[in-house]
Amino acid sequence: MNLGTRKILDNSFTAVGMGSIVVMALALLVVLTPIVYNGVGSVFFTGTIEHRTMLYKEFGRGDAKAIETQTATADRYRAEAYRMLSDFEQEMEGMSLEASRQYRSKYAPVRAAMSSLLGPLPGDPVPMLTRFQYGQTRWEKAEEKLHNILYEKKWDYSDPTVMAKAFDVPRAEEFAGTKLAPLFSYAERHLADMMQPQFTVYWGFFTDRSLDAHIFGGIWPEIQGTFFLAIGAMLFAFPLGVIAAVYFTEYAKEGFFTSILRSANSTLAGVPSIVFGLFGLAFFINTMKVSESKSVLAGALTLAIMILPTIIRAAEEAILSVPKTYKEASLGLGSTKWNTIVTVILPAALPGIITGGIISLGRAAGETAPIIFTAAVSVGSAIGIADVFSSPTPALSWNIYNLASEHEMASEIRHVQYGMVLSLVSIVLLLNLSAILLRAKISQKLKG
Amino acid sequence: MTAEHKESAVEAQATATRDIYIPSERASVSGGGRPHVVAKDFSIYYGDFQAVKKVNADILSQYVTAIIGPSGCGKSTFLRAINRMNDLIPSCHTTGMLQFDGEDVYGKLTDEVLLRKKIGMVFQKPNPFPKSIFDNIAYGPRLHGMTDRKQLQAIVEKSLRKAALWDEVSDRLDRNALGLSGGQQQRLCVARTLAVEPEILLLDEPTSALDPKATAKIEDLIQELRGSYTIMIVTHNMQQASRVSDYTMFFYEGELVEYAETAQLFTNPKDRMTEDYITGRFS
Amino acid sequence: MILKRILLLLTVLLFAPVDGGAADGGIVIDGSTTVGPIAKSFAAYFTGRYGVPVTVSESGSGNGAKSLINGTCDIAAMSRAMKSREIAAGATKGVSPKEHVIALDGIAIVAHPSNPVPSITKAQIAAIYQGRITRWNAVGGPNARIVVIQRESNSGTQGSFRELVMGKGVKITRDAETQASNGAVKNRVSSTPGAIGFLGLGFVDSSVKVLGVNGVMPSPATIQNGSYPVSRPLYMYTDGEPKGEVKRFIGLPETVDGKRIVEELGFIAK
């Protein structure tokens, strides 16, 4: 191969390599940007007076005085809107039966949209569900609802042979000439007055329980459940994994049996996590009956089985990478094999073992499938350390799925979903970061 | 080993007196000279390969015995057989007899852990543990049940002094041993071995990874320790063997070709092969 | 330093006093995603009022039944009646499922909002799901392919739909696409112009268009008076007669508050 070809080959290889790194970085950016942007929005957002009232009433937090004055101001502006509604309701009473019926069917969505924006209207009974007891707590949602008040989204079904197109009809036109007509421009002009938007930092998102199936409140039970499950899994898997790795590297005689064990271990590492989930249900809950129902314990055991192969492999490699000379030195001083393992080999292998462990911890925190049938519930309160043997728990990974796909109001609580995703990503990142730090620290100590 | 030598060794054992030639410039060692390690038709195999072939030799106590020979001649294997380091290699097994202080090294009832306590070893590459200097030296004593801090400190100091390292490291005993220079590390390894008070020191090419200055210090150290310990040193370096040792064994292709007093072996080798090797015809 | 802080944080997290209290004697509910909103709201109400923790899993009616049979839940929430096969399986394990109707629900037939078809007949729906009608123009709509969306076999809504619309033993076309929850069906239909799917009434919102069945739109009134043809009760099952807290929970749909919760969620109180 001549010099020119070699250079071209080298350069093109470099280009391809750089290219794939750039593609990866871009993909990461594309994935992370919305997560970070929207996730941050669950804590930092423009909140309305409804948010502050809700926090004060449900969690007893907030400045009672300020809320009172703001509520008073908001109520002054709302009263005007409420007056228009009741005026129109009276007006309808006096209309001809036909006209009244026509207006009533058009009026119902307006009333519903107003109630959705401002909370229960005067004269309405207090709803049972917390979600209907308050108006919109977030400003951008309030603006959306305002749009629903101002416009009716209609579909043009006049030609049944083509798919219809949507168009917005200003309701002000539909109610032209009635006492409701001024409401629309009034609502548009005084939305801010009625909602009292304010930049809000809601740290409680991480530390509050959820209210009414995550419509309001925070995600503390999920965060705590995630920690319980991940740490519980480590408590089982880490010691077992290290012991198994010691057996493989120091005690097992190379032979048929050992190689079977080894390939079984590698195979386990590649088994899809849902299989572990089903195994956990069948074995830990239905057969062993470690708990009456789903529980943190059963989930942690299942996750432990799932991460065990990874821990064994990481520990095995870490132990094998310990220089043989350490072992010789220790044995040469009259140390027993076991003592050598405990006092020399394991400490020297610790950085590698811990790295493997913490990366597995991150994986345990992020997995959904193994806990579906063994530990996760969509609604449940935060549990104490004493309840892990009997109680199931919500957990970030599963509840993200649940909120995004199964929740009846999934599209209304995107910010909660993103907040959960961001929390989960942060937790995993934090764990990996601490793994790196810990490893660096121990390596440094070993190097002197 | 020549027949005469063997006879004289056996005789020495029988009469408990010594009657062997000591080079004039090297002083005889009082109380030394009994056969400390005895090999009888001792062979070592790696699987089917016979790495050491029917060696017969007495290693005399308190003297320095060097083992020389070209690479792959089995000299390291022989050395490592004495404290059963070869046990780490699964395919390795032995035939014949190897005795230490009259005890069968490879006997069924022999506790290799106790054996290794009495037979210290220093390796080719300095291999301090990734721990502090203090913990390195104290590792052995702690292993054998010593917990008292004062006693440990005393042992650490004594061992480091014996290894001529104390003056260099006394102010930084808590520092990581891997921060020392290669020569210091090797002397630390010697000190670590001395801390368990062995009877024999096995040195497996202890200076091959060191520069000349550090090598000189190790050689000085061996001179210092001579007389207190039975020392066996495997070396590639024939000058080193002639400088530090009282007796020299020459191995070739697994066989012990010649075993004699160092001065005699280097000045007047009996075997043609030995002569060729020490004159540098092959290596 | 950072390490110590992380360790400290973890310790605090683990042993932090938590609100919610002991879960001893808590109620465990498993089952239908359709009944999910009711179960979750009842749970919140019940915990708030009586201080008894209630956990809710939404893993589907079939899994709810399995959990009850295996004794791993106190209440199985189901959007279909238990099958005789499941009751038999329970009997072998000493579990005798007791049925409680907690609400009525219409199965809304939904399409993309842009679809001009206002209403179809039950027979047409059956034909679409059997694969005999594949284009919207056969039911008075535009000439577009029908994307058939169904639920997974574990779903109670799927079971009810097949029973009410298709009749026993009639197979659904292999071209039908399967979604795992009401929410997933809603998402798929609202983003696919040619799609048809079915949802619990409580899940319907403005992102999908509800089709009338035989000219009747699903609403509390038409479901209660039986004129809407695709409606079914929603159930909770217990092992034998419920006792203690479970009994009180099962009694919620009979209370005024319980009925209001059901209605506010868009289901029909019985």
Image (cartoon, coloured by chain):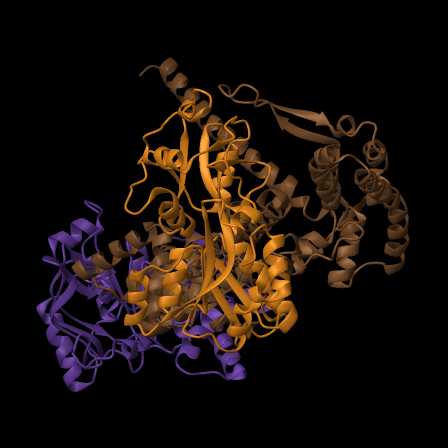
Is residue B117 or residue A208 the one in the foreground? A208
Residue C265 visible? The answer is yes
Q: Is residue A204 left or right of residue A243?
A: right
Is residue B226 or residue C21 the one in the foreground? C21
Q: Colour of chain C?
A: orange
**Residue A310 rendering spot, x and y as whole percentages:** 38, 55
Q: Toward which corner of the image does residue C43 lie, by quadrant?
A: bottom right
Residue B123 visible? The answer is no
| Chain that appears brown | A
Residue drawn at (59%, 46%) of the image: A409
| Chain that appears purple | B
**Residue C141 rendering spot, x and y as whole percentages:** 46, 23
**Residue A426 rendering spot, x and y as whole percentages:** 59, 50
Residue drawn at (17%, 81%) of the image: B12
Q: Is residue A425 left or right of residue A357?
A: right
Q: Is residue C42 left or right of residue C75?
A: right
Is residue C77 or residue A393 the one in the foreground? C77
Q: Toward which corner of the image does residue A220 lie, by quadrant?
A: bottom right
Q: Is residue B232 left or right of residue C102?
A: left
Q: How many callouts does the rendering have?
A: 0
Residue drawn at (16%, 86%) of the image: B15
Q: Toward which corner of the image does residue A129 lie, by quadrant?
A: bottom right
**Residue B92 rendering spot, x and y as whole percentages:** 17, 63
Quarter holding the N terminus of chain B is bottom left
Is residue C67 or residue B51 the one in the foreground? C67
Vertical arrangement, residue B162 with respect to residue A299, above or below: below
